[in-house]
């Protein structure tokens, strides 16, 4: 004889006279676990959008217009479209992304509130000619992707400030997408890490130590650690233990 449980639900008596209890609520994760999950989701979001950003440089087709900014949602956007002037030669190479290590710039710069526009329009200049449409809108819609949760400090754009005799102007060398988003939100100031000519010796010495360590690693292993790291970030290689 087949038995089918048709006992009444909670609050009702069954044939034995007992009352069913409500099922226990699932345990809630701790605040630490919730914070870790939030950081993991932010990391996944940055990783998932990295591929789109990478291919923006090769996008040739038509692109729909973003409903908020009015800019294309695919491809590369000239910095002039957001009001910044392109000045590639005004920032010295030692202050740029290609000419120095990030840790050198972080350790030898000062956090300041930099004016990015005035009543006449944007005043900040750019050392980069174009920005990624995907990245621009991603960081505007998901601000949590603008910083790496593994770093103890908030990531900020970097700017070189010329000497007073050269005008004392701020030239953006890193963080163009974040500053472009701030301009589109009509902000007047933005926090940045500012470098001047006084920081040059320390930045060059710090960068030289990083390059020497990289060279030693390559001599001992025959593998460029930066190339491997970048390949993993773009999902081009499998991590150890991955299926």
Image (tube, rainbow, N blue to C red):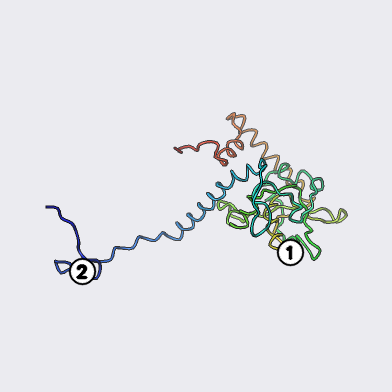
Q: Quadrant of residue 17?
A: bottom left
Q: Name the residue under label 1.
A: 188
Q: Residue furthest right?
A: 165
- Name the residue: 59% across, 45% down: 50
- Labelled disc at residue 72: none
Going by the image, does 120 lie left or right of 232? right
Would you say residue 119 is visible in this rendering?
A: yes
Residue 236 is situated, as x and y percent measured from the top left of the image, at 55, 37
Of 177 and 205, the residue lying toward us: 177
Going by the image, does 30 lie left or right of 88? left
Residue 84 is situated, as x and y percent measured from the top left of the image, at 77, 54
Name the N-terminal-most of marks 2 and 1. Answer: 2
Cα distance, mark 2 to mark 1?
65 Å
Going by the image, does 142 lie left or right of 162? left
The secondary element bearing badge 2 is classed as: loop
Q: Name the residue under label 2.
A: 19
Residue 53 is situated, as x and y percent measured from the top left of the image, at 62, 45
Disc 2 vs disc 1: which is toward the camera?
2
The secondary element bearing badge 1 is classed as: loop
Of 98 and 130, the residue lying toward us: 130
């Amino acid at each position: 004889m087949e038995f089918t449980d048709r006992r009444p639900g909670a609050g009702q008596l069954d044939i034995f006279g007992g009352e069913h209890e409500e099922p226990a609520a699932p345990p809630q994760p701790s605040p630490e676990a919730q914070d870790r999950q939030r950081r993991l989701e932010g990391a996944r979001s940055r990783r998932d959008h990295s591929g789109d950003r990478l291919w923006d440089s090769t996008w040739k087709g038509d692109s729909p217009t973003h409903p908020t900014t009015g800019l294309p949602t695919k491809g590369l956007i000239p910095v002039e479209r957001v009001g910044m002037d392109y000045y590639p030669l005004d920032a010295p190479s030692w202050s740029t992304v290609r000419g120095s290590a990030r840790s050198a710039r972080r350790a030898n710069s000062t956090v300041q509130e930099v004016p990015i526009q005035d009543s006449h329009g944007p005043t900040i200049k750019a050392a980069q000619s174009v920005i990624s449409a995907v990245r621009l809108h991603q960081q505007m819609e998901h601000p949590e992707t603008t910083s790496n949760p593994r770093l103890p400090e908030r990531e900020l754009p970097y700017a070189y400030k010329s000497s007073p005799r050269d005008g004392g102007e701020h030239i953006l060398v890193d963080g163009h997408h974040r500053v472009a988003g701030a301009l589109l939100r009509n902000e007047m100031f933005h926090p940045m890490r500012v470098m001047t000519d006084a920081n040059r010796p320390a930045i060059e010495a710090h960068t030289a130590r990083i390059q020497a360590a990289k060279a030693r690693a390559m001599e001992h292993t025959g593998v460029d650690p930066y190339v491997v790291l970048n390949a993993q970030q773009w999902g081009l290689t499998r991590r150890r233990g991955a299926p």
